[in-house]
Structure formats: C-alpha cells, structure tokens
Image: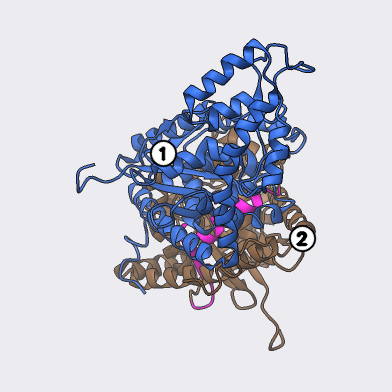
Chain colours: A brown, B blue
Amino acid sequence: MTSGQQKKIILTGDRPTGQLHLGHYVGSLKSRVELQDEYEVFILIADMQALTDNARTPEVVSSNVLEVACDYIAAGIDPERTHIVIQSMVPELAELYMYLSNLVGVGRVERNPTVKAEIQQKGMTDHVPAGFFMYPVSQVADIVGFGADLVPVGDDQAPMLELTNDIVQTFESLYGGGALKPIEGMYPKVGRLPAPDGKAKMSKSLGNALHLDASDKQIKAFVNSLYPGIDGRQIADPGVIDGNVILTYLDAFDDDADGLEELKQRYVKGGVGDSELKKRLLPRLQALIEPIREKRIELNKDLNFVKQSVHKGTMAGREKAGRILSGVKSRMGINYAETLFKGIA
Amino acid sequence: MTSGQQKKIILTGDRPTGQLHLGHYVGSLKSRVELQDEYEVFILIADMQALTDNARTPEVVSSNVLEVACDYIAAGIDPERTHIVIQSMVPELAELYMYLSNLVGVGRVERNPTVKAEIQQKGMTDHVPAGFFMYPVSQVADIVGFGADLVPVGDDQAPMLELTNDIVQTFESLYGGGALKPIEGMYPKVGRLPAPDGKAKMSKSLGNALHLDASDKQIKAFVNSLYPGIDGRQIADPGVIDGNVILTYLDAFDDDADGLEELKQRYVKGGVGDSELKKRLLPRLQALIEPIREKRIELNKDLNFVKQSVHKGTMAGREKAGRILSGVKSRMGINYAETLFKGIA
C-alpha cells in the first residue's frame, strides 16, 4: 500500500442474538483480525436486522449488543483500527434503505432464495414480518452505506452481492455515478464448522455451539461430543475420514500439518482410538479459547472500554454513512438542506 | 378548550408531484385552514412517499416541494400555527418505519386494497417497486411518528386507519403502552370534486385540474369546459341535475343556498341555459382563487419567507418525531444512547 492510497473498505458484521462461538471465529473473526491492518473494516452489530425476526423478543437482541462487542475485542479486533458500529445508532442507513427500496421490484425481493430458505428454516411460513421480507434491501443499504469495496460472504450469499450490484447499477443509470460503489465478495478459505453431531452447522440458535468464553470443562465436554463419523467402531477397526467431525476440527485448528497427516494415516489403518484424535484437538482449542476468555473476563470488569470503543466506532460509521447518504441525496436532487435551505436557520 | 389541555394533533399531507388544485382546496386545504386554531396540525410534504413511484423522475418530486408549500401558505395555512414538514428531512420517520415493519405480516401488506388499486391504476403490474409496495407501513410511521390523534381521510382510506391501529395495538401488546397513539379518521363534509367532464375526480396526473394560481382566463376556460350532464340540450328543454358538473361545482362554491335553489328550480323547468349556471359559478371561483393567486405571486417574489416557514415546521416535526422515536426505542429496550452509552463521549 503506497502512501496516499486509500485502504479498501470491508463491511462485515453479525446479528446480535447470542454470544459468538467457535464457528464465528473460524468463519469470520479470525480473518477479520488478520484483515484490519490492510483494510478499513466496519463491523456492523446488526441489531435492526436481528429485530426483523425477533420483534417479539427484543431483549434477545438488546442484551447481546455489548456481548458481541466484547467477543470481538476479546478475539483480537482492535477498536483503534476497526470500527465496531451499532446499526440502530446509524439512522442514515434507514434513510438510505428507503431510497434504495424504490429501485428494486417487490417480485425480485420475493424470489430471494436466501430469504425463502430462512422462512422455511424459521418456520415462518404463516407470518413473515414485512421487515424480515425486506431485510435483503436493508442489507444492501448497510453495504453501500459504509462505502464497502468488499464483503466477506459464504457461498450461499451470492444473491446478496447480485442484489447490491444491481441496485448500485440502477442508481447509477438513473442518477449518475460516484455516489455508490459496486462490491465484490471475499470468499473464506475455511468452510463452515459442522455441529458436533456432524449434521448441521454450528449455530447459536441450535444450541450446539462452543462459545468463545467457554471454560476448560466446557471445551472438554464439547470435544468429547464430536462425532467420529461412524457408530460403534472398535479401536482395531479402521477409522473413517469422511464425516469425522473430530478430524474436521483438527483440520481447522491444528497447524502441524505433517503431524496431523501422520496421525490420519495411522487412524485409517485401525488401532487408533477416537480418544487420540480428541487428545490432540483438546489442547489446541484450549490454547485458542483461553486468551479470548481471559481477555473477556478483563473487559467485563470494566465495560467502559468496550462502550467507548463501540461508541467511537459507531460515530465513525455515522460519519461515513452520513457522507454517503448526502451524496445519494445530491445525485437524486433531494438534498434540500444544501439547496433549498442553505443559509436558512 | 380549557387552559392546560393539550390540543389534539392532526396529521395530513400531500405527495409533492405537482401544484395543488381546486380539488385539493375543497377536499382538504379549506378544512385544514379552518382547523389550525383548534388543533395542532402537521402537514407533511410526503416527498419520500412520492419517490416510491417516482424514483425514475425524482425532479418531479423535488421541484414541487416548495411549490406545494407556496400553495399551502397562499391558501391560508398559517405557518405560525401549522407545521409544514418535509418528510425526507425527518429521518426519525425512516427509523420508525423499520421498527414498525416488523410488526405486520407481508401478507397483510400484499392484500392492502388501496395499494392493489393504485398498482392497477398506475399500470405497475409488471414492476412494483418494493418501496411502493411497503408505503402503507411508511405511512403508518408518519401518522404515529407525529403523535396524531386524527387523520383526515377519504372513504377509501379505511385500510390505512385499520393498519395504523393494528400496528399500534401490536406494539402495545408487545412493548407496553404510552409510546404510540391509536388514531381516528376525520371524514370530509364535501365529497370529491369531479373532473370537468364528470367522468373522474380532478387530478393533477390526469391534467384536468384547475390550479390554485390559475389566471382569470384559465378559470373561465375551465368553467366553460364543465359538462352539464346531457349532450345537445336546447335552452327550452329541462336541465338535468344528476351528473351536471356545473351544479356540483355550484353546490361546492356557492354560499347563497336560497338563490342557488331558486336557480335550480327554474333550470329543471327549461328555458334556462347552461350559460346562466356558468355565469353564476365564474365570479365565485374567481373570488376564491384571486387572493390565493395574488398571495402566491407575493410569496414568489421572495421565497425566503416560505423557506423559513417550512424549515421551522420541519424542525418542529423532527422534534416531535424524535421524542416519539425515543419513546418507541425505550419501550423496545433499544435506546442504547440513553442506556449503554449514557455519559460516554
């Protein structure tokens, strides 16, 4: 990065509906920590989005806003470099969302495969809140509202990228360029961690997640619950690789590739118990989680540092979103504060 | 009204997509002028709502914001008593809209008969902007966002009242009462003015409207174009009452009920030309429009008064909407600025 060149902007975030867990660490937190030097990163605590399907239990959302912020900082997000932003404290995003809503057909929103799948998964078929139905458009406002160049996404989030870029393109063709940026996806190197039983992804809502402040006892119980891919194997039998959750976790957390490869070769021959895999995994997870847990305990002793960090990040977010919204309104010719009312007090 | 008792609040408004016309005067402006002493009136220049189906031509909206404000003041709205508010300058409404969107099912929005009819009328069937689809919920945010007790409505706007009160009730049952008020409709005494040909309502979009700054020549041409309810009548023939647009206008604008009744009786007997009706109507419309036109010319000479008035009204609107939004967020437990971040700078 030569001097004078602006860092590219990344927007990422989480819905604050529970503490973060190991799946978040592998899927996003780890890379966010690595990216914060090279990029300007905005991490959005997406409480408004979380409320679209938690309106009946807003305390699930409100009680987790600061928890998630603690998780971020404990996991290595440096609030001096990364902006941690609370979505509901950036009203510019709500305004932007309304203007962008006019640039996409309701049929397109209706056909969004991600939302369709979530409606099924959440059993919402009878009552889909209108806000939930529309959240992909709100998400577009979040992305363009912070001027993101890049958004880390999973393979199933292609519709979000497409919707964003289509709306940006429509905006440009109607009102001219320069106010909003098209985005690119950043695809993770590591796939999603499976749940201990190997059947689903680790998920706070499914209650199968290892939190980032887990005790050694919880980590041990978690490791012991991991499914070895086959039922009732005797030690003498060959171990299986496919569907072996212990090995999937070792792949994610064991940096000693040669040692792991050697173990796998012995394991598939037979004579190696699952307990040997677990013994190898346990200290690695403990070593990963212990400093996060300790840091979290320290942060919890005086939440002022976390609060100040989030407040500062949120103000930086507002400032950025405010400038973008102002550009959007200028292009549309509706920035009356700067035109009709300039100089009027 | 005893002292200390708060005035009830009325919310009303227009989409700024053209100058106001005689239909607006009869249907709403006249009564707004009469109500501004007894009530606290917020008149919303609903530019965000207008953009939901004018996103491709935002200049239609932006160029009419101040025009509509001029029409208001010229027609007798007193900005010292009535708050003239530009919707897009009250971002609290956008926030409120997002929270309220979570309290109504998308199916309910989809079935809204008013929106369905408009989609047909505007020929939008292929491409309904998502923002337009959702505008009834945004309208609810406008109504409750200014703490309205009363909303002047036409007979076809019952769904708007119902949606508002259902959302208010859902909000109360989930988060407790006191933050949002249920509303009542105020139904107009006078029905809608027909178009000159008697076939539709007067409408800026249909181009059959008499603007409130019309010249005497334009008023005369307009009066001459009014349909007498029957084709090819000879003076000797009896005149018709039903479908006679000239008489409908006389009913609306002639205060001399006895004189008008006498004329009608002679007219139905025959021997009275339509020109006699028109001669009676013309000076009455001229007397109504002339002072509005003159006032408008005066306002146009120095728009600063209009701008200051609208700015002041908008700031009053923001203040009101800000307090209501703050109450809403408190009830939901998400007013972090007052809880998590109190004292943090």
Q: Residue A101 placed where, x, y %?
A: 64, 48
Q: Quadrant of the C terminus of chain B?
A: bottom left
Q: In this view of the protein, can residue A272 be seen by the observer?
A: no
| Label 2 sits on residue | A172
Q: Amino acid at mark 1?
A: Arg
Give the vertical position of B175 relative to A338 (above or below): above
The quarter of the rendered structure image containing the N terminus of chain B is: top left
Asked which secondary structure carries label 2, the reply is: helix
Specify the quadrant of the image occupied by residue B269.
top right
A303 and A278: which one is in front? A303
Residue B287 shows up from this direction: yes
- Frontmost residue, A148 versus A236: A148
Q: Residue at x 53, y 64 (%)?
A: B307
Magenta segment, which residues?
A: A80-103
Quick check: is A81 in the magenta stretch?
Answer: yes
The numbered disc on residue A56 is 1
Direction from residue B337 to residue A39 in the image, left or right: right
User: Where in the figure is residue A242, as x and y percent of width and height?
Assistant: 69, 45
Residue sitting at the far bottom: A3
Query: Which chain is mark 2 on?
Result: A
Mark 2, Cα crowd under 10 Å, few <14 / some 14-19 / many 20+, is: some
Task: Verify CB contact (< 8 Å) between mark 2 and mark 1.
Answer: no
Which residue is outermost to the left? B3
> Real-space Cα distance between discs 2 and 1?
38 Å
- What is the x, y in percent for residue B116? 65, 29
Name the residue at 60% across, 78% down: A37
For badge 2, the amino acid type reads Glu
Mark 1 residue crowding within 10 angstroms, few (<14) / some (14–19) / many (20+):
some
Q: Nearer the viewer, residue A93 or A164?
A: A93
In the displayed structure image, the side of residue B238 where residue A135 appears, left or right:
left
SS at mark 1 in the image: loop
